[in-house]
Amino acid sequence: MAGRTIQYAELNASELAALAPARIIVLMALSPLEVHGPHLPMACDAIIAQELQRRLLPRLAERYPDYDRLVLPPVYAGADTIPVPGSVNVDSRAIYYLLLSTGRSLAEQGFRYLLVTDNHGGPRHQIAIEKAVRKIYKERRFIIIAPFLGFYRRMVENDPALLEATGTGPGSSGDLTDAHAGRNETSLMLATAPDKAAPGWQSLPWVVVGRGAIARGLVRVGSAALRLVGARRLAADLPALAMALGWLAAGAKVTYVGEPRMASAEAGERMLEAHVEEALAQLQRAMRGQPPYSLPLLWSLRWVERS
């Protein structure tokens, strides 16, 4: 009987053997424990990733009634967390091997699809995930859908369609001026678990990083030069590189970027819905035979991630 939601960890060996793996969509939430300002929990990204999974389950049941849904336990791990005491940073190579090994194990059992929900934009975290996606697809034709990779790029680049769908704009869409525990992520938490947003978030001021003279010069001069030689993707990645350098320069002084006090549960709902739609669209394309590839931020500099 198809259409069930099953918890992998609760199965015994006989129950697992009785499944029809080719007609199952496996799901896993993956995000780190990381400082998110003075107002959001360490598990902010993981809580949002699990909420996305929760919202996807009935949508998958509706869209794919002949498929079961098999839920793996959440994984609290991520690379390139902000450099603040309290963040638990995991080497990106561990993220790569975690997904690659999980994909291989599932493929050996006959499963074909793994949908990974995530809410972490660490550069090497995202690059490692994409490397695992491509490796396992080429190796086994096993499909890992990691929708946040492309979705985060759309957020950072202020994709017009995304801005329209979410009713946001620059500074409120999770772009580089709102990249961490600011207006967007606070809105997501208000829509997901409002009791976990600490009192006082309404008074937190706007904070920026990565706007020093060196960072501005890198983006302005470097982008122009790269576009002249046709390296448009690398030019588009330079602002994200400047942001990463800004975090390193700020050190423990900065724990969020953006303007949390402007957050709302309504904005969070719209962003969650847009992310769910992105996941469904990517899964649909993969089921139609399209490789499940994305272009995460800094993919043009993927050699910085050592997997």
Image (tube, rainbow, N blue to C red):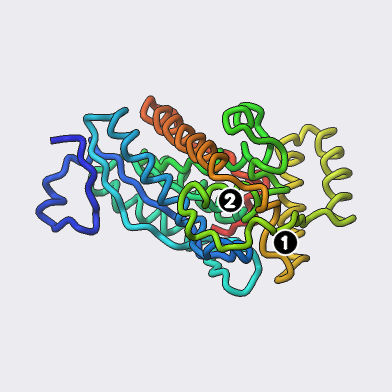
Residue 68: percent from left, percent from top: 23, 39
Q: Name the residue carrying label 2.
A: 185
Q: Name the residue carrying label 1.
A: 247
Along the line of sight, the residue nearer the viewer: 55 or 136: 55
Which of discs 1 and 2 lies nearer the camera? The answer is 2
How many other residues sit within 10 Å of disc 2, few (<14), some (14-19) or many (≥20)? Answer: many
Tell me the amino acid under the disc marked 2.
Glu
Image quarter in which the N terminus is found: top left
Residue 196: percent from left, percent from top: 49, 60
Question: Which residue is depicted at the point 73% across and 65% down?
Answer: 248
Q: Decide: marks 1, 2 in contact (CB < 8 A)?
A: no
190 lies above or below 168: below
Q: Secondary structure at mark 2?
A: helix
Q: Secondary structure at mark 1?
A: helix
38 lies above or below 148: below
Dot placed on the residue nearer the N-terminal end, 1 or 2: 2
